[in-house]
Amino acid sequence: MGCVESMNYEIVMRDATFKESRDYIKAHFKEFIDVQPGFKVFDIYVIGLPPIAIGLDGDFVIFPFTKPCHGTFLLRIEDKEEAARLRAGKK
């Protein structure tokens, strides 16, 4: 994929800090992984202060995305294959 603008996404939080995003994911989703900056989700490198939490909720992937000049958003995107890939990497 590689372009968030072309995906069907939901904005969970706007203007979120990386800590707020991490805390939200850990408080609202039973399943999550912690990754380091530079980890790829949907062929997009995530940036931020480590650890960066990525939530999994069924086929949904929840992750922070920083758009230059617009800030950081916590996004929710449904993608069965990406959710399965992230789960497989946890093991």
Image: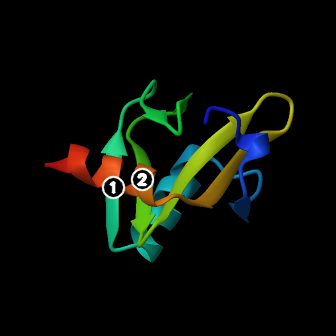
Report crowding for label 1: few under 14, some 14 to 19, many 20 or more residues within 10 A (C-alpha).
some
Residue 52, label in figure? none
Residue 18 falls in image quadrant: top right
* Mark 2: secondary structure: helix
Q: Position of residue 74 (x, y in %)?
A: 64, 55
* Mark 1: secondary structure: helix
Q: Position of residue 28 (x, y in %)?
A: 46, 75
Q: Amino acid at mark 1?
A: Ala
Residue at the location (37% across, 31% down)? Answer: 36
Residue 84, label in figure? 1
Q: Looking at the figure, which quarter contains the N terminus? A: top right
Q: In the image, is residue 41 above or below residue 61?
A: above
Q: Amino acid at mark 2?
A: Glu
Q: Nearer the viewer, residue 23 or 53?
A: 53
Residue at the far top in the pictured view: 38
Q: Are circles 1 and 2 on residues that touch, CB within 8 Å?
A: yes
Q: Nearer the viewer, residue 22 or 65?
A: 65
Q: Mark 1 to mark 2: distance in Å? A: 5 Å
Residue 30 falls in image quadrant: bottom left
Q: Is residue 88 left or right of residue 59?
A: left
Residue at the location (52% across, 50% down)? Answer: 19
Residue at the location (70% across, 34% down)? Answer: 3
Q: Nearer the viewer, residue 38 or 6?
A: 6
Report crowding for label 2: few under 14, some 14 to 19, many 20 or more residues within 10 A (C-alpha).
few
Q: Which residue is mark 2?
A: 81
